[in-house]
Image (cartoon, rainbow, N blue to C red):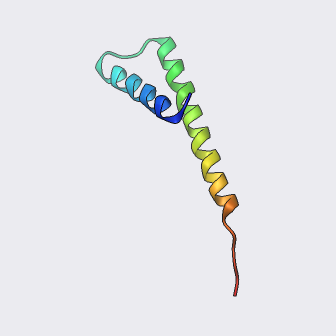
């Protein structure tokens, strides 16, 4: 699942939660999708930090 569809589904579940609430299955799906999203952010941030090269004069 690409990041755009992941975010879209998370947003759909958030809107549904505000409107009518989520059932147990949807709540679990939302938690799983959020964790995947956070792992992706952490991985990308780690890659950015690893690519930084410190140069002293």
The residue at the far left in this view is 19
Asked where in the image residue 33 lies, by quadrant, the reply is top right
In the depicted structure, whether residue 57 falls above or below residue 22: below
From the viewer's side, name the closer residue of 33 and 22.
33
Residue appearing at x 45%, y 28% in the figure = 10
Say left or right for 1 vs 55: left
Quadrant containing the N terminus is top right
Q: Residue at x 57, y 39 (%)?
A: 38
Residue 36, horizontal then vertical, whole percent: 59, 32
9 or 32: which is nearer to us?
Answer: 9
49 or 23, which lies in front?
Answer: 49
Measured from the top left, where is residue 52 in percent x and y? 66, 65
- Across the whole image, how many numbered discs are drawn on residues? 0
Q: Quadrant of residue 11?
A: top left
Residue beneath the point at 49% across and 12% down = 24
The x, y position of residue 13, in whole percent, is: 41, 23
The structure residue drawn at horizontal position 51% and vertical position 12%, both measured from the top left corner, is 25
Q: Quadrant of residue 22?
A: top left
Residue 23 percent location from the top left of the image: 44, 11
Please state, as top left, top right, bottom left or bottom right, where the C terminus lies in the image.
bottom right
Placement of 3 over or under 15, stated as above or below:
below
């Amino acid at each position: 699942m690409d990041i755009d569809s992941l975010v879209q589904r998370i947003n759909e579940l958030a809107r549904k939660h505000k409107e009518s609430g989520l059932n147990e299955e949807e709540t679990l799906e939302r938690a799983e999708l959020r964790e995947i999203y956070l792992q992706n952010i952490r991985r990308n941030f780690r890659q950015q930090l690893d690519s930084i090269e410190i140069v002293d004069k």
